[in-house]
Structure formats: structure tokens, C-alpha cells
Image (cartoon, rainbow, N blue to C red):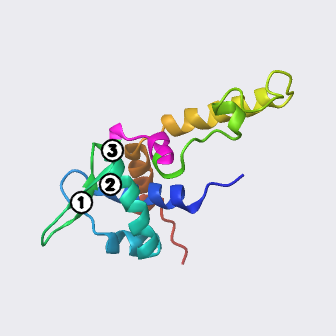
Amino acid sequence: MQLCTRARYGARALVEFALAHPDNTVSLKEVAKTQRISPKYLEQIMRALKASGLVKAVRGMHGGYVLGRPPSKITLGEVFRVLEGSPALVDCVEHTGVCPMEEICPTRDTWVEMTKAIMTVLEGTTLQDLAERKRRKGSPSTLIYHI
């Protein structure tokens, strides 16, 4: 089981906007370079994020993108749903009645449990959390120099 690049890249891009929030806009070119994402692919991702209201485009000389809400109010669960849809591992977890084995299936309860665990992590993690994590990982105090 793997997350697709759309969700991963979208989350990484949004962290860049969270780091700049609330004072600065960030250009797609900057994000693409910093996050090593194809600019064309990033544009596709940004269209979905903009349509959902998670980001807003700012025109003009210092234009770019900004978050639509404070980073503490945007969860990874919301980002995932916008870019990927449901995190349910199998259809029968989200839509009852799609499988004739639903009531007697020995594995369905496990898929439900796994989906709930994934949702707990996604809904419990905000862009603010990720921005703080990135600051810690990039802070000089975490670097070790060997001579």
C-alpha cells in the first residue's frame, strides 16, 4: 500500500505555504524547486487545492499562493480527501452494500480498523504540525558536523 505522488507532493507544497503564512506569498516555481516537483505536475495539484479553498492565488508583482485558512486549521485528512478522495482501503469500508460478503467477511473488520487508524493520524496532523516539524528538522541545532 502506497500513497500516490499527488497527496505526497500536495502535502509537501502546502507545508511551504504554511511556513510563509500569514505574511508572504510563495510562487509555484519556488515550491517546485524546493520540493523537487515537476512544475507542470504541481500546477495540476494546485488547481485542485485552489478549487477546494485550501489555497488562494494572489496576483501581481509579488503574487503566488497563500493558504486559504491558518495552517493550524487544515488537516492532512482534508488535503488527502481533496487530492485523493477517501482513504478507505477497500470500497466496502466506505460504502455498505457494495460487497455481498460484507456481513460474513472475516477481513472487513480489519480493513475498517486500519482505515480508522489512518484517519486518526491524518485528522490529527495539521499543516502547522508539519511546518513545525520541518523547522525542527532544518534547524542548525539538529545538524552534526564531523571534522
**Residue ID for mark 1:** 57
Above or below, 76 against 83 in this view is above
Is residue 121 found left or right of 52 in the rendered image? Answer: right
Decide whether residue 24 is among the magenta residues. Answer: no
Residue at 65% from the left image edge and 31% from the top image edge: 95
Q: Residues within 10 Å of mark 2 (few under 14, many from 20)?
A: some
Q: Position of residue 23 (x, y in %)?
A: 18, 55
Q: Position of residue 43 (x, y in %)?
A: 39, 68
Q: Position of residue 107 (x, y in %)?
A: 83, 31
Query: Does residue 122 appear anywhere in the picture?
Result: yes
Query: Does residue 139 appear anywhere in the picture?
Result: no
Identify the amino acid type marked 1: Ala
Magenta range: 72-81
Identify the amino acid type marked 3: Pro
For mark 3, give the secondary structure: helix
Q: Main secondary structure of the magenta part?
A: helix
Residue at the outermost bottom position:
147
